[in-house]
Image: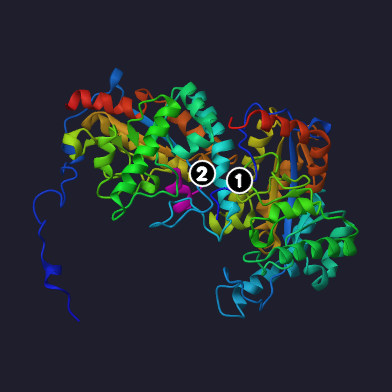
Amino acid sequence: MKPDLGLYDYWPYEGRPKIRWPNGAKIAFWVAPNIEFYELDPPKNPLRNAWPRPHPDVLLASNRDYGNRAGHWRMMEVMDKYNVRGSISLSIGLIDHHPELIEETKARNWEFFSHGIYNTRYSYEMDEAQERAIMEDSLESVMKATGQKLAGYLAPALTHTERTMDLLAEYGFLYTCDLFQDDTPQPVNVNSGRLISMPYSLEINDIIVYNAYLGTPRRYGQMIKDQFDQLLKEGEECGTVMCIPLHAYAVGHPHRIGGFEDALEYITGHSKEDVWITTGREIAEYYYETYYDECLADINARKGG
Amino acid sequence: MTLDKEYLEYPNRKYGMDHDLYDWSILQKREPVKWPNDAKVALWISYSLEFFPLDQPAKPFKAPGGMVTPYPDLRHFTTRDYGNRVGIQRLWKVLDKHGLKASAAVNSKVAERYPYLVNKINERGDELIGHGVDMGKIHYGGMDDGEEQALIKESLESLRQASGQPVTGWWSPGKSQSWNTMKHLAANGVVYCCDWGNDDMPYQMNEAGGNLWAMPHGDEIWDRTIIMDKKHNEEEFVEEVQDAFSVLYNETDKYGGRVLSLVLTPYIMGLHYRIKYLDQVLGWIKEHDGVWSATGTEILDAFKAQTG
């Protein structure tokens, strides 16, 4: 084990290249619904149990399944209302289980990125061939179902190995959502090719707010607005990225959807010169075209600060 | 089943403490202290800059904020690192806006990895205090004494060299000490430590002939405790700090100068959606007359000048 994988370099959040998003926007905003499939009776990973109770864990498994049956559709209606496309963090296996969900989101021109095969299969203790198999399966399955070449990755249940980032770059993924060190993208140090870290969030992530911070739905809406205001202001100096990661099994409940809708209404009420409402892929593509080289040069010039 | 007879023997049952690390003393029965310019409340802000290694051992436990999931726990590694990159910049901006000084507790590994941060601390005029080597190196009862001496020496020498500051304050990682920590701190030029949360004012430790002091450095009024442990939200955090300030401020008429010690964590309070609440509560405090923003050393020096 190593104290640090050296995946990125230290880069102080001041004096950076002045990023501007399309239309001169100061903040790039994207919404990432996690559309996950949780198996009722998955095989055991040596380092993590899928369910806290003996299988079948009816309480928790049905809680998760609620998202696909009910929550997703309610959440999608709200996103439709404000013309916000989702970038779906997809359990790839769900393509086979619930094709209706893929068809509906594809018809809306949403993006799909890989979140592993199932959210009940973890990367811990995988050998390289197994981790490659997940990425290859992801690329093939999404291409076949949607015609999209996968651009993004969020490791299943955020479980990683030391080689995850190198493999992503090798397979031509454009961005990873697995690193949380910043509010702007950053080049990741990989063995070959290129990869950037894309700001996702373990803070205004609905699951974190509801289950870790024990926040109320209305408080959640306020947190989103507070974060947006701050990053919009800071975006004057250097364009920022803000992501709202969602889980339909959490935010899609009737008592919770209102807090999210309130925040979405607030954000989409801003002008195009302030906020670029977009997807993970579009942010990554734009960044590679415009700022990747400049940012990399800045990081290298300031190594160690 | 029965217990050994020693279990009902109380060899330290006597007036005062059951140990000789410091003397028993009642906060409300001490001589009043006057702060410079007759300030009522000394506002002591401190923040920590920490490195959590991915291979953090649980020896004998993981410091709060440490790795949680199996290796490599990139989610906690990177969210902690966010504080050293982004969060700290927001804290500094808010402190600048209100003209406030602070004490910066720094792991020596942070100083070595990110010299930028030490240079900024010096530029700002913040006091740098020792915070151990990194968050994987806990001081604890029963640890090898030579190992602990080496850790303290390594941390202080590295920080003094990097900063050019005397580094006479100390906050142990995870606020954990061995039976020998204070002896070694005093022997290495440390004048005050932040680990004991048992008072609202500085007090003297018996170590090193009374040359080591405990500073009030709350384990309760700390963003980590209020937000991460108690799960209170940002508006509640503001209320709690305001309430603490008001109580201390009002006590000064009767008891003399007080200290409000506010302990901040860049990866917690420096988040985008939280920082405005820190701005708000510090602005509120600054509206009061008689607030003295000071570093730990400045407060302790003023205190010692009156209490001998």
Q: Main secondary structure of the magenta part?
A: helix
Mark seen at residue B234: 2
Residue A12: image location, x then y, percent = 60, 32
Is B227 covered by the magenta stretch? yes
The quarter of the picture where residue A163 lies is: bottom right
Residue A286 seen from this side: yes
The residue lying toward the viewer, choosing from B50 and A87, is: B50
Residue A41 vs residue B225: left or right? right
Mark seen at residue B210: none
Above/below status of B141 relative to B86: below
Instruction: Tell me if label 1 and label 2 are in contact, CB under 8 Å.
Output: yes
Give the residue at x 27% y 32%: B191
Q: What type is the residue that disc 1 sits on?
A: Met
Q: Residues within 10 Å of mark 2 (few under 14, many from 20)?
A: many
Give the residue at x 56% y 33%: B90
| Secondary structure at numbered mark 1 | helix
Residue B306: image location, x then y, percent = 19, 24
**Circle 1 is placed at which residue position?**
A223
